[in-house]
Image (spheres, rainbow, N blue to C red):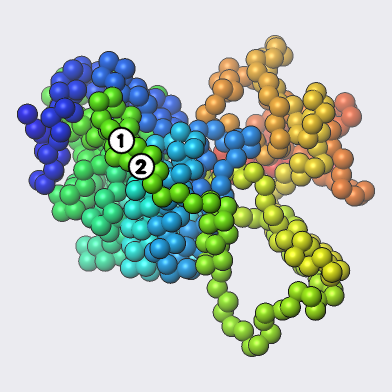
Amino acid sequence: MTISLNEDTAVDARLVALLDQLTLEEKVLVLTGHDFWATWPLPKIGLRRILVSDGPSGVRGEVWDERSPSLNLPSSTALGASWDPAIARRYGNVAAVEARRKGVDVVLGPTINLHRSPLGGRHFECFSEDPILTAKLASAYVTGVQENGVGATPKHYIANDFETDRFTANVVVADRTLRELYLLAFEEAIVDAGAWLVMSSYNSVNGPTVTENELLETPLNSEWGFDGVVISDWTAVRSIESARHSQDLVMPGPAGPWGDTLVAAVLAGEVDEAQVDRKVLRLLGLAARVGALDGFEAAVPVPVVVEDGIRFAREAAIAGAVLVRNDGELPWAAERLTKVAVIGHNAKFARTQGGGSATVLPEHVVTPLDGLIAALPNAEVTYSVGAVVQEGIAEFPLSTIENPVTGEPGARVRFLDAAGVELFSEDRRASALVWFGGDAPIAASSVLEFTTRYTPEESGEVLIGFASVGNGRIFIDGELRHEASAEAVGTDLGAAFLSPPSVTVD
């Protein structure tokens, strides 16, 4: 027995046999995430969970935690500036090795939207404003990830090239423009590189939201022969209507708009069970490719292209650095330099990433100031902050904080219930903390307590504070110095989570 996923692809009969063992409820279960980062396991058919992770500039893993550091690869704009598909392919290779080190099956990247407006807040994740350059780099990146046995996820399909109203905007676009600009990179990533997943975006295109749009079938499946999984951007699926289209997997879970509602819709004849079956078969096919399904050998059992990731990150950063003009001033000879002035906020407080969901936590960062001091041992290097570009509060440097419990650099963090009883505690090595998965009892907690001993690098007035949505209290030497409530600006949950408002006190 075979079921066609598209005109050119027949499903392995073994997958169909596994599908036949599932109840409708089990089929629907695996089409919504088990949690924030993983799919549901079904032990009865030998299906383990499939773990996905944010990329695209590195692989964070299941937890957002400085104790589980990641290789910090250059942002995708640096790849665009390199104009080098060979670098992009190696970039994918290295990302896949990182993914495997962290037990990740699928990297949520590359981001291949276009730089269509200077106001696009996630342009650092994307390669270029040029569709052909983007297409070549996207194809190479996907090839690099998947030839090391990890699924790649070109995103965000489609025309999601802006930040303002990214969740709700309707992009009205002619077919030629759609195909020659917005779709080209996705086409090459699928037709040439064989991407195993595609991520559907929040916005609408010519009316329907993408998760309920015919663009998921044509050209994606019918013309390009895509046989992988369409995974939603997080919370992009809003209704049961998406189940009638070629949207396959709803993230995150366990709650979602399908679930019991989709089961009821199938039983009522409102959604054809064959549509559900096609989605499940695609998910099982992905599981087979990444080695998450018993009886199927992974497409690539072990990484086959492995190199020194730190060395590569340095090489890729250099390849993406562009010297616009040199009037004979460069290069400087290090031994002839006697005094060097370094000016700029980011020289001392390095910004090595764009931020947001593309954030990874590196083991350490060599700042431009540190690098110049090390490279110029015979020169006097002076520093001035210049214009401060930090918005909101800054993280405490690890060298300035001490965990009062362990005496080690860092802080003690506790989760308390409404009565003040400790539910969970952990020792952290940072003060910028995000709980996105992991063991912390977020829902059961009423209070998050962060305690550290802080020694400033120099005497002076210091602003101490917090950045989070909710009510906060700041104690210094046991004295309550400030209490305030910080409220989210706007309705964008991602912005409230990743860039919350700040409260400070002198």
Instruction: Say if residue 406 shows up in the picture.
Output: yes
- Residue 120's x, y, as percent? 48, 59
- Please tell me which residue lies in front, 242 or 386: 386
For this view, does 494 lie left or right of residue 115?
Answer: right
In this rendering, the answer to whether 100 lies above or below 460 is above
In this rendering, the answer to whether 455 lies above or below 224 is above
As drawn, the residue found furthest toward the bottom would be 327
Q: Secondary structure at mark 1?
A: loop
Residue at x 75% of width, y 65% of height: 375
Residue at x 20% of width, y 32% of height: 281
- Residue 416's x, y, as percent? 68, 17
Disc 1 residue crowd, few under 14, some 14–19, many 20+, Cα 10 Å: some
Image quadrant of residue 484?
A: top right
Quadrant of the frame with the N terminus: top left
Q: Secondary structure at mark 2?
A: loop
- Please tell me which residue lies in front, 54 or 44: 44
Q: Are marks 1 and 2 in contact (CB under 8 Å)?
A: yes
Distance from label 1 to label 2 (Cα)? 7 Å
Q: Which residue is mark 1?
A: 298
For this view, does 293 lie left or right of residue 329?
Answer: left
- Residue 463's x, y, as percent? 82, 44
Q: Which residue is mark 2?
A: 149
As drawn, the residue found furthest toward the left would be 1
The circle on residue 154 is none
